[in-house]
Amino acid sequence: MKLIIASRNIHKIREIRAMLKNSPKWDLFSLIDFPDYEPPEETGTTFIENSELKALHAARTLGAWAIADDSGLVVPALDQAPGVRSARYAGERATDKENRKKLLKEMEHLQEDDRAAYYECAMSVASPEGIEKSVSARCEGSITSTERGSQGFGYDSLFMKHDYSKTFAELEEEMKNRVSHRRKALDKILLFLENRALVHEDQ
């Protein structure tokens, strides 16, 4: 059964593909396979709103089931920033490095407990008929004062999960994929995906 990962972010695509590798019932594609497709503007004020917007637009436009996620970093001490603007924190076309630089600058005055943060991931599955399932999950930790590690993307070199001594960018990819917010969200939606694939097989 065809399932489109509604993203062109190669890091997200690789993570989701790795997490779904034991679910062979799905024939996986991504937006990279549809170069003429124009994604919608992310106008939602929450992660769930944006994930549903992306999944539904891709499903209806491309005529197939689609899975989308919207995720970002939340720092309570910064009034929940960067939040849904995580990818655009330092500007509409900001690079990951520019976003991390701005975050460190904004957090210069914060100490220990005030550096608490969490990654949040909303994940939605849609068919051309509408939204079929939406979930959200968090991974809690803190922000380091300097960048550490070269793996991952986004804010990974600054984010240290609770009870870990390494940032996400220092963890092996397989380990990160077992404990990340995206993994937790996908775990919540996996049973639905598997059941839907079985229903499709029986039809």
Image: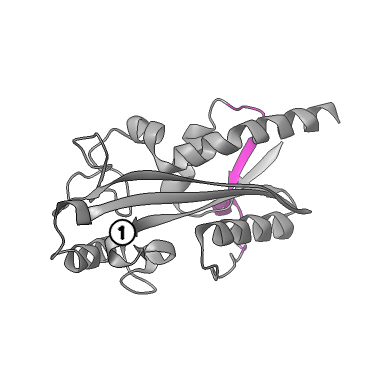
Dot 1: few (<14), some (14–19), or many (≥20) neighbours within 10 Å? Answer: many
Range of the magenta residues?
23-37
- Nearer to us in this view, 147 or 187: 187
Residue 62 picture quarter = bottom right
Q: Residue furthest front?
A: 113
Q: Is residue 193 visible?
A: yes
- Nearer to us in this view, 59 or 43: 43
What residue does disc 1 label? Answer: 75
Query: What residue sits 73% from the left and 58% below the top?
Result: 60
Query: What residue sits 58% from the left and 64% below the top?
Result: 39
Residue 142: x percent and y percent? Answer: 24, 48
- Nearer to us in this view, 149 or 116: 116
Residue 58: x percent and y percent? Answer: 65, 57
Colouring method of the image: one colour
Query: What residue sits 55% from the left and 48% below the top?
Result: 123
Q: Amino acid at mark 1?
A: Val
Residue 36 picture quarter = bottom right
Q: Is residue 157 visible?
A: no
69 left or right of 95? right
Residue 134: x percent and y percent? Answer: 61, 48
Q: Quadrant of the C terminus?
A: top right
193 left or right of 120? right
Residue 1: x percent and y percent? Answer: 72, 36
Asked if residue 32 lies in the magenta stretch, the reply is yes
Residue 82 picture quarter = bottom left
Find numbered disc 1 in the image and state the secondary structure of the residue it sits on: strand
Number of labelled discs? 1
Asked if residue 49 lies in the magenta stretch, the reply is no
